[in-house]
Amino acid sequence: MRFLSAHYVFPVSSPPLRNGIVCVGNDGCIVDVIDTGGKLEEREKLEFYNGILVPGFVNAHCHLELSHLRSAIEPRMGLPDFISSIIKMRKSSPEIIINAAKAADEEMMKNGIVAVGDISNYTETIGVKSKSKIRYHTFVELFGLDSDRSKEILAAAQLAKNEYYNAGLSASLAPHAVYSLSEALWEALYQSYKSSPPHIVSMHHQESENENIQPHVLRCLAEASQCLLVHNTFSTEDDLAKYNTITRQFYFVLCPSSNLFIQNRLPNLLFYPQQKLCQNICLGTDSLASNTRLSVLEEMKIVHRHAPDIPLAMLVQWATLNGARALGFDNFCGSFEKGKTPGVNLITGIDFEKMKLTDKSGVFVKSFAPLV
């Protein structure tokens, strides 16, 4: 048993505790969370740290299989050129892709990430994911504008999904974006969802102006229990307000570093706290093709830099519990609650007067979440 304490403990499912204590079993399971009332007394085996303790991070959007493209693409090219570069450069030997994915997986672990929503078009990363301490949900991505190939594209994606299943990994089919599927492929995907409704789907959302979800797209996504809409770079308050009546179904994933890398633009972060949708905001890193590191903390720091009015407790929730709920992993991670194995991260470099992250803030893993 370990007794971990810091200036503040963020259980996430309840308000922060000044000088709180997280009791962690040898198996990584949360045994108790103690509210000391701010008065911490010496006790045997107590470990006190300078900073805040938070649950392990959830990276709600990543592309592990693109990790070999690190530093390969010029920043601020704009979305069309970025996508063209990915298409031209993504092909490589399986060995290179697997080795880069393994290194990226290890990087995420060191950065306190315990769960990932990962986009895959192929199956090379299955071995990395099945051996990882990180819990993955894989979104097997579909795209294609040739209507005549819609059945072929769907069949190939279903085969890939089955390979993930056979490896003991959770997976579901997911469309790439509104503009990258033919109507025939949308219809084929809808029929697939209708016959076997997925628990979770994901889609890149409003990365460009005038990119709106059409009725046939929404009909398809609505077959899932939950849907992650990713990036939301050009989303407005009115756009998000449309989802207010169904916020339990839709989650909105922000990838600030990737947004800046590709388009030198951020979503309108300032209006997120004013929306009821703030309970459904998650954070993602995107891939190393559009990011220099895979760190949820770095994404949090960008948000604080550009939207300092967002409270730290809310930002921690975006980085942990919201992502866990979106991916269906909240039974084991996302918050310090008895019986969970969420991992424990120490965030240092906190401005306690303002309760903000700083540019010097860092993350140190104090207990990693074992797979259960």
Image (spheres, grey):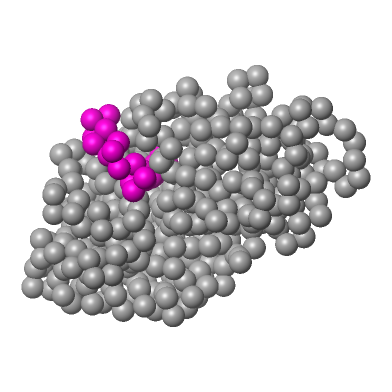
Magenta stretch encompasses residue 255: yes
Which quadrant holds residue 258? top left
Looking at the picture, how far across and down is residue 174, in whole percent? 29, 61
Towards the viewer: 254 or 317: 317
Reply above or below: 311 against 321. Answer: above
Q: Residue at x 33, y 46 (%)?
A: 250
The residue at 56%/62% (across/down) is 134
Residue 144 can be seen in this image: no
Percent x, y of residue 127:
50, 75
Position of the C terminus by quadrant: bottom right
For the point 64% across and 46% down, the residue is: 336
List the single residue furthest toward the top.
353
> Which residues lie in the magenta part?
237-258
- Image location of residue 232, percent across then percent down: 30, 41
* Horizontal relation, residue 264 to residue 208: left or right: right
Q: Is residue 248 magenta?
A: yes
Give the answer, above or below, for where 117 lies relative to 240. below
**Whether residue 200 can be seen here:** yes
In the rendered view, would you say 192 is above or below 257? below
Q: Where 56 falls versus 91 (above or below)?
A: above
Judge left or right: residue 198 versus residue 185. Answer: right
> Depth check: 90 or 189 in front?
189
Residue at x 18% of width, y 43% of height: 211
